[in-house]
Image (cartoon, helix red, strand yellow):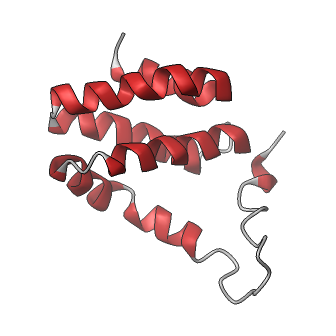
Amino acid sequence: MDAIKKVEFAISSPMNFDVYAIEVIQDLNQLNCRKHNRKIVDYIKRVIKGSEFNSQSKFLALKLLNMCIMVGDAEFLDTVQGRILQRLKKFAEHRKTSSDPSRGCDLFSQNDS
């Protein structure tokens, strides 16, 4: 199964996440390929930006991205920095002036169906 299919399955439900996220991480460790990294990061970026994905998928995509980042592979980190860091910065700045601890709860809600 190719990398994107594994990512798609991982973010499709919390139950699938537990199975397929591990496979994505294993592939990341074994392949260590810039092209492979780029596919994963670009797909995650498409998910978190796209209105066709619900908030659960977006959350799982960010969770998967975090797991991939925690692997600590320099190539993957470079890919994240170059391709998705600005989008992540926008998320971090969401309602940044608010002191409400739940200020991020509505980050994706306007895109839910």
Residue at image x 38%, y 42%?
42
Q: Is residue 65 left or right of residue 95?
A: left
Residue at image x 34%, y 15%?
2
In the displayed structure, would residue 97 be above or below residue 74? Answer: below
Q: Quadrant of residue 23?
A: top left
From the top left corner, tell me how far across and down residue 99 is, in percent: 75, 87
In the displayed structure, would residue 93 be above or below residue 14? Answer: below
Residue at image x 48%, y 21%?
20
Q: Which quarter of the rendered picture does the C terminus lie within?
A: top right
From the top left corner, tell me how far across and down residue 89 is, in percent: 48, 71
Q: Is residue 43 left or right of residue 107?
A: left
Q: Quadrant of residue 80?
A: bottom left
Q: Is residue 8 left or right of residue 97?
A: left
**Total number of numbered discs in the rendering:** 0
In the displayed structure, would residue 85 be above or below residue 79? Answer: below
From this viewpoint, is residue 27 visible?
Answer: yes
